[in-house]
Amino acid sequence: MEYMTPSIYQKIINAISYIYSKSAIDKRIDLFRFKDVLDSYSEGQWKSKMWAVEELEKHITDKHNACLIIGGWYGLFSHILCDRGFKKQVKNIDIDPAFKLIGKKMSSFDNISFITRDGLDIFFDEKTNYQNKIVVCTACEHIDSEELYFALGNKHENMIVCLQSNNYYEVNSHINCHDTVEHFIKSLPLKNILYSGTKTYKDDYDRFMVIGK
C-alpha cells in the first residue's frame, strides 16, 4: 500500500516489542494489543483513513489551526494527514490510556499528540469548540447515537466535522451502525452537509462518511 513505507513497518515492530516488554509490568498493556495494533493498520483501515483525509483536505484552509480526532486509536489517520502536508497540531483523543502509550511509539511527526480523555468533551470545552478546529471521528459506530447527537448539537456552528460509521452490525462493540449513508446523516444534527459517500469493502460491509457543519 502507498503509505506502508519501511519506516512504518519498523514503527509497528517497535510497538509490538514495547507491548511485549510492558505487559509484564503494566496492567494497562496486555498481549491482545498485538492484534489490536495490526488491526489498526489493516488494509481496510488504510483505505477508510485515506478516503477521509482526501475528502477532508478539500475543506481545510489556512485558518484551521488544529485537527482533533475522537477515538484516534494508535494514530493512523493523524499519520496520513501529516504525511500529506498538514503542519498544524493533530491531537488523538481516546479514553483508553494504553492508546496514548502505544500511539506515541508509532508516531512519526512532532505535531502529533495523544490525549487521554472523552473525545466528546471537545464540544463542551470553549478551548476546543470553535470554528478553527477540525474534528474527525472515523469510529462513530462505537459511540452511542444519542450521546453523539447531543454532543454534536453543542458544537460551534461553523466547525467542520468528518464522521464515519458503517453497517457492520455483527461486531458487538458496534452500537451505532446504519443501513445507508442517508440514514447516518439523519442521525446527525448537522445543518450543512459538505460531502457524503459510501465505500464497500471486501469484508462485505459498507462504510459511510459525512463531512459537514
Image (spheres, grey):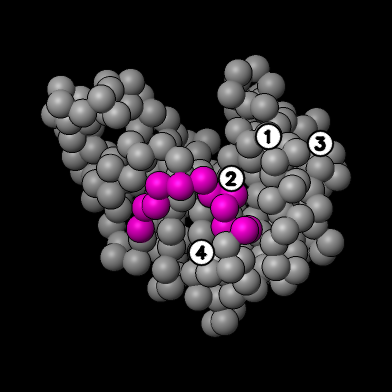
Q: Nearer the viewer, mark 3 or mark 2?
A: 2
From the viewer's side, name the closer residue of 49 and 121: 121
Q: Earlier in the sequence, mark 2 or mark 4?
A: 4
Query: Residue at left 74%, top 48%?
Result: 150
Percent from the top left, x then y, of residue 72? 46, 47
Name the amino acid, label 3.
Answer: Thr
Disc 1 is placed on an element classified as: loop
Which image quadrant: the C terminus? bottom right
Q: Which residue is mark 3?
A: 180
Alpha-carbon span between mark 3 and mark 2 = 16 Å
Residue 1, located in which quarter of the rendered image?
top left
Residue 190, located in which quarter of the rendered image?
bottom right
The answer, for residue 134, to whether it is visible in the render is no
Query: Residue at left 21%, top 43%?
Result: 10
Reply yes or no: does residue 116 show up in magenta: yes
Q: Nearer the viewer, mark 1 or mark 4?
A: 1
Name the amino acid, label 2.
Answer: Thr
Q: Earlier in the sequence, mark 3 or mark 2?
A: 2
**Label drawn at residue 144:** 1
Give the magenta part as a residue range: 113-124
**Tag 2: Cα neighbours inside 10 Å, few (<14), some, or many (≥20)?**
many
**Label drawn at residue 138:** 2
Q: Earlier in the sequence, mark 1 or mark 4?
A: 4
Percent from the top left, x then y, of residue 156? 70, 68
Name the amino acid, label 1.
Answer: Asp
Alpha-carbon span between mark 1 and mark 4 = 22 Å
Q: Which residue is mark 4?
A: 67
From the viewer's side, name the closer residue of 32 and 39: 32
Alpha-carbon span between mark 2 and mark 4 = 13 Å
